[in-house]
Image (cartoon, rainbow, N blue to C red):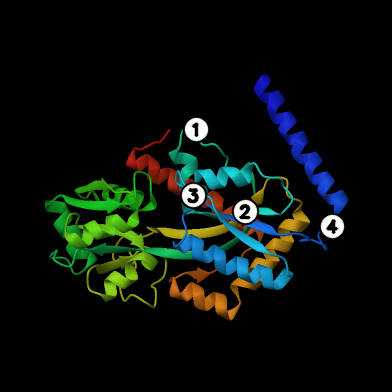
Amino acid sequence: MMMIRRIVLKSAVVFLSASAWVGSTSAQEYPVRPITLVAPFPPGGALDLIARALAQKLQEQWGQTVIVDNRSGAAGIIGTTHVARSAPDGYTILLGATTTHGINPSLYKSLQYDAVADFEPVSLVATIPHLLVVNPDLPVHTFADFVKLAKVKTLPFGSAGVGSPHHLAGEMLKSQLQLDLQHVPYKGSAPAMTATMAGETAFMSVEVTAASQHIKAKKLRPIAVASAQRIPTVDVPTLGEVGVPGFEVTAWYAIYAPKGTPRPVVDKLSQALAKAVQAKDVQTRFASLDATPVGSTPDELRTYMDSEIKRWAQAVKAANVSME
């Protein structure tokens, strides 16, 4: 009874806040003051760089300051929770990702936010595929070589930590192909890649953005890309082409607003973001990250997110992991 009362009270607060906002200004006037774009991961990574590129274009379109606020920690939970609890007025928004809105909902037993109920989807803005990379000294040059070796020998693989996309990708390969793979968690994808380059681990599934410079230096060897289509910067087949149909591990990035943000504001944000990702300088910036610009409607993002939550829930189940 108490829980029901809390939910009703929370809904009333959101409704009143949204009503007060609508009474004070309109979607046509929005934004009339600075906007904070929360990036729930540290500076310097792909998410942070995408956030800054988008912030600049929104600022140019609207003539209002757009501040990127890096609130990192706990697999994106700290920053994401902050936005979930912010006023639903369009002035605090989030650049969410695969981890925050795809994996965390099924990975954590007691998540501080609800990825669906606490947010208004705004727009899917970019995707970055994962690559399967191996240590160059490994006698593996193709995915077939990899499968053959993993059938007769235990191959350790690195990840950015338990429950990370890198970890779950390895567990999905292990489950689907019955391979002898052993997970070795690290504190981030960079040390995990370093371990693969040093031969401490045999392979890793990692974002192409992070691996590309090491591939060019021949410190890592790519053998397949975990996306529906091949990518122009790395000449390897997709996992679907080499016998693993439907296998896809893609880092995706999307803008969210707190639940209760008026739909006219959500739509205005979505339209501005669609325009931003089409700008030549943003596309050049994204290309340097091996990111594909998207741009979507709020409803398209909701459909995509729902499918991703279901897909990653299966991966979490296959990995048999959970976090408090």
Among numbered discs 3 and 4, the one appearing first in the sequence = 4
Give the x, y percent position of residue 305.
55, 52
Estimate the spatial distance between the alpha carbons at disc 3 and disc 4, rounded to whole Å: 32 Å
Q: Say what amino acid the circle numbered 2 marks.
A: Tyr
Estimate the spatial distance between the alpha carbons at disc 1 and disc 4, rounded to whole Å: 37 Å
Quickly name the residue at label 3: 72
Position of the N terminus by quadrant: top right
Estimate the spatial distance between the alpha carbons at disc 3 and disc 2, rounded to whole Å: 16 Å
Estimate the spatial distance between the alpha carbons at disc 2 and disc 4, rounded to whole Å: 20 Å
Residue 228 found in image quarter: bottom left
Among numbered discs 3 and 2, the one appearing first in the sequence = 3
Q: Residues within 10 Å of mark 3 (few under 14, many from 20)?
A: some
Residue 241 found in image quarter: bottom left
Q: Residue at x 26, y 67 (%)?
A: 223
Q: Say what amino acid the circle numbered 3 marks.
A: Ser
Towards the viewer: 220 or 320 = 220
Q: Secondary structure at mark 2?
A: strand
Quickly name the residue at label 4: 26
Query: Which disc is residue 110 wearing?
Result: 1
Towards the viewer: 150 or 76 = 76
Among numbered discs 1 and 3, the one appearing first in the sequence = 3
Estimate the spatial distance between the alpha carbons at disc 1 and disc 3, rounded to whole Å: 19 Å
Furthest residue toward top: 1
**Labels 3 & 2 near each other (Cβ < 8 A):** no
**Labels 1 & 3 near each other (Cβ < 8 A):** no
Q: Secondary structure at mark 1?
A: loop
**Labels 1 & 2 near each other (Cβ < 8 A):** no
Q: Say what amino acid the circle numbered 1 marks.
A: Ser
Q: Residues within 10 Å of mark 1 (few under 14, many from 20)?
A: few
